[in-house]
Amino acid sequence: MKRLLFLIIFCITNLHAINKLEKIYLHKTPLEHEAHLELAKLVFCFSDEPNIKQISSLVEKDGFRHESYMISTDEIDNACRGRLKSLEHEVHPYYRLVCSEQQAPQAGIKIDLYYDPKQVTCSFDEFDAITNHKGVVFRLINKNLIDQLSLQERPPIHVASLARPSIVIDCAHGGRDPGAISSNGVFEKDITLQVGLTLAQLLKTENYDAYVTRDNDFSIALDNRTSFINQIRPDLYLSIHANSSKKKDVHGLQTFCLDDHLFRHNNIIDPFQRAIKRVYDRSNQFAHVVHQHILSHMYKEGHQLFDGKVRHAVAQLLLGTNIPGVLIELGFLSHPEESLCLASSQYQKKIAQGICNGIRAYFAL
């Protein structure tokens, strides 16, 4: 009888799972907007499926279109509350953002987008994030570039110069953000920095322009990393990570990139979808090339690195840019043997060389 009563109480208390707003990101591009497909992406990540609806759409006296949306949520992370306040007055010559917490007539987040319809158009997508969050991304799209794309087939991707292709290397984590930590005290942030700096040096010796998001042990917000990449506007970028799992036997190399099927489109803008699909296709191609070259180089160097495959997932760094790019998980710090390898400077140099080989092969296609 007590067990039955417990089950009844448990079921009643879990009829409505609490949906919490856990992350907010604003990925921006520079003011020189002509070259960029997307001017900004406003991203909300929830613990459960968000309920989003458009409240209104009208033209203001100043000619800006005003679109209002409501996303219901039961709870808001404290850091997100601070982020909402910082987004109350996000101003750009072609758009304005106002985000606020609402209690009535329902609890949630109200998003007001104001944009110049001559310069900008807007869409939003829903997705499942790499962290198991449920996400919504509002995209402010460069209308002038989209209009040009309607008249031509040339993709809006920066075509690599045969003389000096450019690559941005994101050395993930850093500073007060250590990333994954192995049982013997190896920090992910140290591995990503050493591999990234070694890779940058290898690329420079091969006549590439190579940039790193950090060159020392300091922390950089994801929004700032994506802004840096969008500012540089390289031919390619990659983000270097080391993985972790509760299962100690999981190991191997994994490479992630975006794919169009990850998004549930709500209002499709055909030229934009075609253009962004080209970016995703380039990312997929780059992912497979660099993944295979890492595996083959490590095998030649005497390391049987397990093939964890190329995978599709919405990571914020990948979402926040509009340039072909990948996220590489070099191995698992939770795996005892692999963590020892990843901590070795010689192993790090070999991994960096494998990535360099993959970049060279991609540009040779």
Image (cartoon, grey):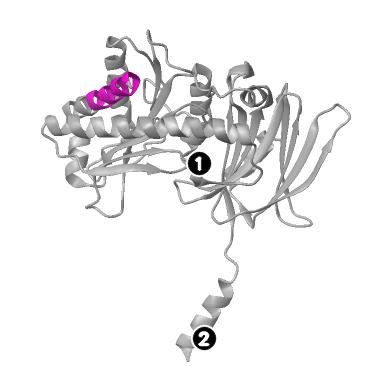
**Location of the C terminus (image quadrant):** top left
* Closer to the eye: label 2 or 1: 1
**Magenta span: helix, strand or loop, mainly?**
helix
Q: Which numbered marker is on residue 15?
A: none
Comparing 134 with 12, the one in front is 134
Where residue 65 sits in the image (x, y, percent)? 79, 33
Q: Is residue 94 magenta?
A: no
Is 227 positioned to the left or the right of 304 in the image? Answer: right
Where residue 175 sits in the image (x, y, percent)? 40, 30
Residue at coordinates 16% horizontally, 43% vertically from top-left?
337
* Residues shaded magenta: 352-364
Is 98 positioned to the left or the right of 235 in the image? Answer: right
Q: Which residue type carries mark 1?
A: Asp
Reply above or below: 83 against 359: below
Residue at coordinates 47% horizontally, 34% vertically from top-left?
280
Label 1: which secondary element: helix
Q: Which residue type carries mark 2?
A: Leu
Q: Is residue 357 magenta?
A: yes
Q: How many labels were placed on the picture?
A: 2
CA separation in Å, label 2 and label 1: 47 Å
* Residue placed under numbered mark 2 in the picture: 5
* Residue placed under numbered mark 1 in the picture: 260
Where residue 41 sits in the image (x, y, percent)? 60, 34
Q: Which one is earlier in the sequence, the residue at label 2 or at label 1?
A: 2
